[in-house]
């Protein structure tokens, strides 16, 4: 079998020499993330592009988020994947899992997309995956980039990500979800590659749940879509929130 893709993109698809119109791909420009009227961050994504190299096809996504002084905690990207061809994980096909997967030798044991440590699970240094090397603009802008792909062998492939911008309180391990978008690609059994995104969806999406994070990481993190977790408190409220954080730390801790 000749493993050469018929290519579907934002404007046309080459299928047996014919062309058909597809929905336009979307980028995101200066998407403001606010909480009670206060600007926390601004998100930008370029339009996704198609990746095709022989029998391998996928999607390329790049973007960033820039926080303001109102942003509380650590800014992170958190991504979950649902695919019929999972890799670097024991998660069954069709079940969402955290990216990177728990078997990825380059990854860390945190729920976030970029590594929290310079070293991966295999003991080697991966400076390109270390979150500290993904910040710019004085530590206020956090980049995102991904190029998921799969090899087509004659069976249909589907791959979808739900990507969230989150704040992380290192004291309480509370994760506040501020924004969620989806993107992905499909390859039909006949070799037609189609990409989609990036599409803004309900905050938190459907993959990131408390049950999912507990199953993967144990009783460590709490997940909330309440934006107040990511908002620097007014001066009068700081003391009360600090006390609440101490109580939360007592309830949830690493084993």
Image (cartoon, helix red, strand yellow):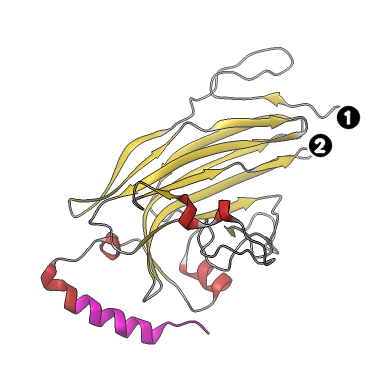
Q: Is residue 128 above or below residue 5?
A: below
Query: In the rendered structure, does residue 243 fall within the stretch colored magenta?
Result: yes
Residue beneath the point at 24% across and 78% down: 242
The residues colored magenta run 240-255
Residue occupying the point 63% across, 20% down: 13
Query: Is residue 47 rendered magenta in the image?
Result: no
Q: Nearer the viewer, residue 175 or 83?
A: 175
Quadrant of residue 60 in the image? Answer: top right
Residue 108 is left or right of residue 65, and the answer is: right
In this picture, is 236 found above or below 17? below
Answer with mark 1 or mark 2, whichever residue precedes in sequence: 1
| Mark 2, other Cα within 10 Å: few <14 / some 14–19 / many ≥20 | some
Mark 2, residue position:
154
Give the number of the disc on residue 1.
1
Q: Position of residue 101 (x, y in %)?
A: 63, 60
Q: Is residue 216 visible?
A: yes
Q: Residue at x 56, y 62 (%)?
A: 118
Number of other residues with Cα within 10 Å of mark 1, as a class: few under 14, some 14 to 19, many 20 or more: few
Is there a contact, CB below 8 Å, between mark 1 and mark 2?
yes
Q: Which corner quadrant of the image does residue 168 belong to?
A: bottom left
Q: Residue at x 54, y 19 (%)?
A: 11
Relative depth, front residue between 124 and 1:
124
């Amino acid at each position: 079998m000749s493993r050469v893709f018929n290519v579907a993109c934002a404007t046309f698809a080459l299928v047996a020499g014919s062309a058909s119109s597809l929905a336009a791909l979307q980028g995101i420009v200066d998407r403001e993330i606010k909480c009670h009227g206060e600007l926390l961050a601004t998100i930008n994504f370029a339009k996704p592009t198609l990746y095709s190299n022989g029998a391998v096809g996928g999607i390329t996504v790049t973007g960033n988020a820039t926080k303001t002084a109102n942003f509380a905690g650590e800014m992170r990207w958190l991504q979950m994947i649902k695919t019929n061809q999972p890799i670097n994980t024991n998660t069954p096909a069709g079940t969402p899992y955290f990216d990177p997967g728990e078997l990825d030798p380059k990854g860390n044991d945190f729920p976030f997309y970029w590594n929290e440590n310079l070293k991966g699970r295999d003991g080697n240094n991966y400076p390109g995956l270390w979150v500290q090397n993904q910040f710019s603009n004085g530590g206020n802008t956090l980049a995102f980039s991904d190029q998921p792909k799969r090899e087509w062998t004659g069976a249909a492939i589907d791959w979808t990500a739900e990507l969230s911008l989150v704040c992380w309180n290192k004291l309480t391990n509370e994760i506040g979800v501020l924004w969620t978008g989806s993107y992905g690609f499909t390859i039909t059994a006949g070799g037609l590659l189609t990409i989609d995104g990036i599409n803004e969806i309900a905050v938190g999406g459907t993959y990131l749940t408390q049950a999912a994070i507990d199953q993967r990481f144990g009783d460590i993190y709490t997940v909330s879509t309440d934006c107040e977790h990511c908002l620097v408190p007014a001066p009068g409220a700081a003391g009360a929130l600090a006390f609440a954080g101490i109580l939360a730390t007592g309830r949830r801790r690493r084993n």
